[in-house]
Amino acid sequence: MERLNVICVDDQREVLSAVAQDLEPLSDWLVIEECESAKEAQELMDELDQAGDLVAVLVSDHVMPNQTGIELLTEVAHDPRFKHTKKVLLTGQATHSDTITAINLAGIDHYFEKPWDANQLRKAVQSLASEYIFSQGLDYTLYQQYLDQDVVLKHLREV
């Protein structure tokens, strides 16, 4: 079974910890990683890629120093190594144009405003990680008990 990673990025430690805590119930099948900057996330993604590990989902805050979440997600969207990585933007300060940019340039898969609902975030990450497994062509039966069953049924109908 491949190591599937979810990388959470936020420059505020308490917010980052809250995101990771909300996703902790998924840790039976997903490795939850925490990064405090876009640069740290990019370095971790490089390390994981070199080790042969997979980045299934990237959850990023929008407003961060040096590089915004949209800039990070856009870079990831254009990196062929991570073309299937699912992207989530988490923000409390985005404008309408920021949201449009995130959708058009970064190809985000989900958008949450702060404060987010923990159950909705967890469900979104579970669904996105399930989609990732199918988009990567991984053996979904290895993860069957954890996957979003609606995603599984959708993909089985397509076969």
Image: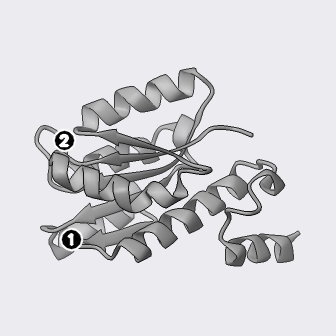
In this rendering, would 26 be left or right of 21? Answer: right
* Count of numbered tags: 2
Residue at 58%, 58% (x, y): give it.
Answer: 129
**Quarter in which the N terminus is drawn:** top right
Q: Amino acid at mark 1?
A: Lys
In this rendering, would 98 be left or right of 158? Answer: left
The reply to whether residue 107 is in sight is: no
Image location (x, y in percent) of residue 121: 41, 69
Label 1 crowd (10 A; few <14 / some 14-19 / many >=20):
few
Picture layout, residue 19 above or below residue 80:
below
Image location (x, y in percent) of residue 65: 10, 42
Q: Amino acid at mark 2?
A: Gln
Image location (x, y in percent) of residue 140: 78, 56
Nearest the viewer among 122 and 79 is: 122
Residue at 17%, 45% (x, y): give it.
Answer: 11
Residue at 33%, 76% (x, y): give it.
Answer: 117
The reply to whether residue 53 is in sight is: yes
Mark 2, residue position:
67
Mark 1, residue position:
114
For label 2, the SS is loop
Q: Quadrant of residue 18?
A: bottom left
Nearest the viewer among 92 and 116 is: 116
**Quarter in which the C terminus is drawn:** bottom right
